[in-house]
Amino acid sequence: MRSCKHATELMSQQYDRSLKRPERLWLATHLMMCYHCRRCHKQFSLLEQSCQARREQMEQSPKGKQDD
Ligand SMILES: [Zn+2]
């Protein structure tokens, strides 16, 4: 289905930019109707969570070792 591709695109974009209201609405509606995209959406949020955790880890760790 073509709309599934659009849904996946929106799902990946929502972390880079905030979706416009009609886009969010469209995605929410599609997720309600489409089991596959719901699963996909779950994967995306898990992925985003692990990315976020990694980012935080990197920010906490000291920037390189200073060898003097
Ligand atoms: Zn779908």
Image (spheres, grey):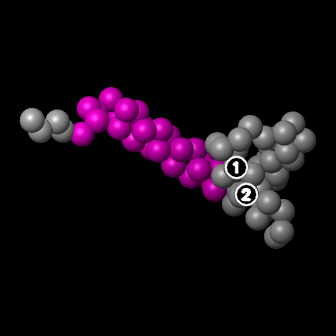
Q: Secondary structure at mark 1?
A: helix
Task: Tell whether position 5 is magenta.
Answer: no
**Residue at the spot x=12%, y=38% of the render?**
67
Q: Residue 4 falls in which quadrant of the image? A: bottom right
Magenta region, main secondary structure: helix
Using residue 44 as the reference point, say whether residue 63 is left or right of it: left
Q: Residue furthest front?
A: 68
Where is residue 60 shown, x and y percent of the image? 33, 29
The residue that mark 1 highlights is: 13
Viewer-side residue, 25 vs 62:
62
Judge by depth and name the residue closer to the eye, 63 or 51.
63
- Examine the structure image and report whether residue 41 is included in the region drawn in magenta: yes
Relative to 36, say whether 59 is above or below. above
Residue at the image position 80 percent from the left and 47 percent from the top: 27
**Region rendered in magenta:** 38-64
Q: For the point 63% across and 54% down, which residue is it?
A: 39
**In the rendered image, is residue 16 in sight?**
yes
The crowding category of the residue bearing disc 2, from other C-alpha atoms within 10 Å (few below 14, some 14 to 19, many at least 20), is few
Left or right: 15 in relation to 28: left
> What is the distance, in whole Å, between disc 2 and disc 1 at their CAs?
6 Å
Image position of 27 (left or right of 50): right
Q: Could you say where residue 54 lies in the image, as x and y percent from the top left?
A: 39, 41
Query: Which residue does the numbered mark 2 point to in the structure image?
Result: 9
Q: Nearer the viewer, residue 48 or 17?
A: 17
Residue drawn at (63%, 56%) of the image = 40
Q: As drawn, which residue projects farthest toward the top?
A: 60
The amino acid marked with disc number 1 is: Gln
**Quadrant where the image shows the C terminus:** top left
13 relative to 26 in the view: left or right: left
Whether residue 35 appears in this view of the structure is no
